[in-house]
């Protein structure tokens, strides 16, 4: 039996769930609020006690019809189920989610940039005009791309890192992974350290102070990628995430264990399946080892 007064999903999210989460990232909280607000609009603000698997499935179907990708639909499904499970545990609902279908996501071959393309990208950042805070835009963006390439860290973790996370004397950068809470210390290449030294300000809280909205970071980077002339298909995950895949692919080509450690993954299968570009991370392909069929033409047959 439901013992508590029953709020809507958005009321539950903002008034009960988020205040009970310690250290939740702002982006994660915003995603939950987005899902709750969208679902309330779809369900006409039904109380959470009346949310059923059938209603959730109908909402997911509406997301599919709106053109969202399977991965985005599954992400929103996961967020809603997190809130529904919380409502059940806190006695706002009689049942947790039990049988909500999940979309099949196509298994795509990971695509990374080559080191030559990263060089073209850095040339493009070096030509940027204007300023960002107390440093030039070209120095700021060159440092950001360099750190993403040499560390392979997630862009959210890079942007959240503090100025004191960088040790210029030792050439190291320390980062806390938002997904796992683990702390990682990266030994950086001297060229990366030099680019970071040009924008480092010990008196500033964040290593990369960005004066605009988080989404605008991707808008500007998309323009830089296009200006560089390297491969880009328009997707948001083909920007900073592609740099992360570049890092993983080159590490995998040298040592798969290194790639797994750098990506902070639970298994080599996860790294290889989702991050390693076979054209970079695999030193030998079938084309290198299969024998070549020798085709004899009719004229050659007559000669013999």
Image (cartoon, rainbow, N blue to C red):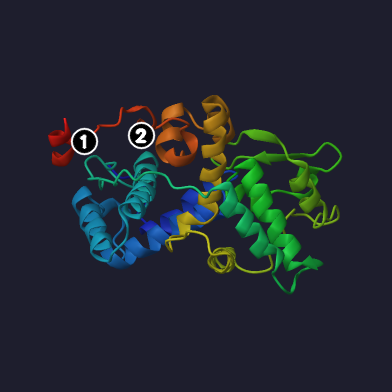
Category of crowding for the residue at label 2, using alpha-carbon neighbours closer than 10 angstroms: few (below 14), some (14–19), many (at least 20): few
Category of crowding for the residue at label 1, using alpha-carbon neighbours closer than 10 angstroms: few (below 14), some (14–19), many (at least 20): few
Q: CA distance from mark 1 to mark 2?
A: 17 Å
Callout 1 touching callout 2 (CB < 8 Å):
no
- The quarter of the rendered structure image containing the C terminus is top left
**Residue sitting at 51 percent across and 44 percent down?**
245
Lower position in the chain sequence, tag 1 or tag 2: 2
- Viewer-nearest residue: 40 or 30: 30
**Residue sitting at 64 percent across and 41 percent down?**
151
- Viewer-nearest residue: 113 or 86: 113
Residue that badge 1 annotates: 295
Instruction: Point out residue 260 in the picture as x, y percentages from the top left corner.
Output: 53, 30
Instruction: Point out residue 95 in the picture as x, y percentages from the top left corner.
Output: 26, 42
- Check residue 287 in the rendering and tell me which mark sits there, or answer none: 2
Considering every residue shown, the one lying at the far bottom of the view is: 130
Asked whether residue 160 appears in the rendered view, the answer is no
**Residue sitting at 75 percent across and 53 percent down?**
207
Instruction: Point out residue 148 in the picture as x, y percentages from the top left corner.
Output: 63, 48
Is disc 2 placed on a helix, strand or loop?
Answer: helix
Height in image: 287 above or below 70? above
Q: Is residue 210 left or right of residue 106?
A: right
**Residue sitting at 49 percent across and 39 percent down?**
280
Instruction: Point out residue 54 in the picture as x, y percentages from the top left corner.
Output: 18, 51
- The quarter of the rendered structure image containing the N terminus is top left
Q: Is residue 270 left or right of residue 299?
A: right
Question: Mark 1 or mark 2, which is nearer to you?
Answer: 1
Q: Is residue 290 left or right of residue 270?
A: left
- Check residue 138 in the rendering and tell me which mark sits there, or answer none: none
């Amino acid at each position: 039996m439901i013992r508590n007064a029953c709020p809507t999903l958005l009321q539950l999210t903002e008034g009960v769930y988020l205040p009970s989460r310690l250290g939740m990232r702002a982006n994660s909280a915003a995603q939950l609020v987005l899902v709750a607000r969208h679902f309330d609009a779809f369900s006409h603000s039904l109380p959470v006690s009346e949310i059923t698997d059938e209603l959730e499935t109908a909402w997911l179907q509406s997301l599919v019809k709106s053109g969202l990708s399977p991965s985005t639909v599954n992400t929103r499904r996961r967020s809603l189920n997190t809130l529904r499970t919380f409502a059940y545990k806190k006695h706002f609902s009689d049942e947790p989610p039990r049988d909500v279908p999940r979309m099949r996501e196509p298994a795509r071959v990971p695509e990374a940039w080559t080191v030559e393309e990263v060089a073209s990208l850095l040339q493009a950042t070096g030509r940027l005009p204007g300023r960002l805070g107390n440093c030039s835009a070209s120095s700021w963006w060159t440092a950001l791309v360099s750190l993403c390439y040499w560390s392979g860290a997630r862009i959210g973790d890079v942007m959240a890192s503090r100025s004191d996370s960088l040790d210029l004397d030792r050439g190291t950068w320390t980062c806390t992974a938002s997904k796992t809470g683990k702390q990682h210390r990266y030994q950086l290449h001297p060229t990366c350290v030099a680019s970071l030294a040009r924008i480092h300000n010990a008196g500033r809280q964040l290593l990369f102070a960005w004066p605009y909205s988080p989404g605008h970071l991707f808008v500007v980077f998309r323009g830089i990628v296009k200006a560089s002339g390297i491969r880009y298909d328009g997707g948001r995950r083909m920007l900073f995430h592609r740099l992360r895949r570049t890092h993983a692919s080159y590490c995998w080509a040298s040592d798969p264990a290194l790639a797994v450690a750098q990506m902070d993954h639970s298994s080599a299968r996860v790294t290889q399946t989702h991050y390693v570009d076979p054209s970079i991370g695999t030193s030998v392909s079938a084309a290198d080892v299969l024998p070549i069929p020798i085709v004899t033409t009719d004229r050659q047959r007559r000669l013999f």
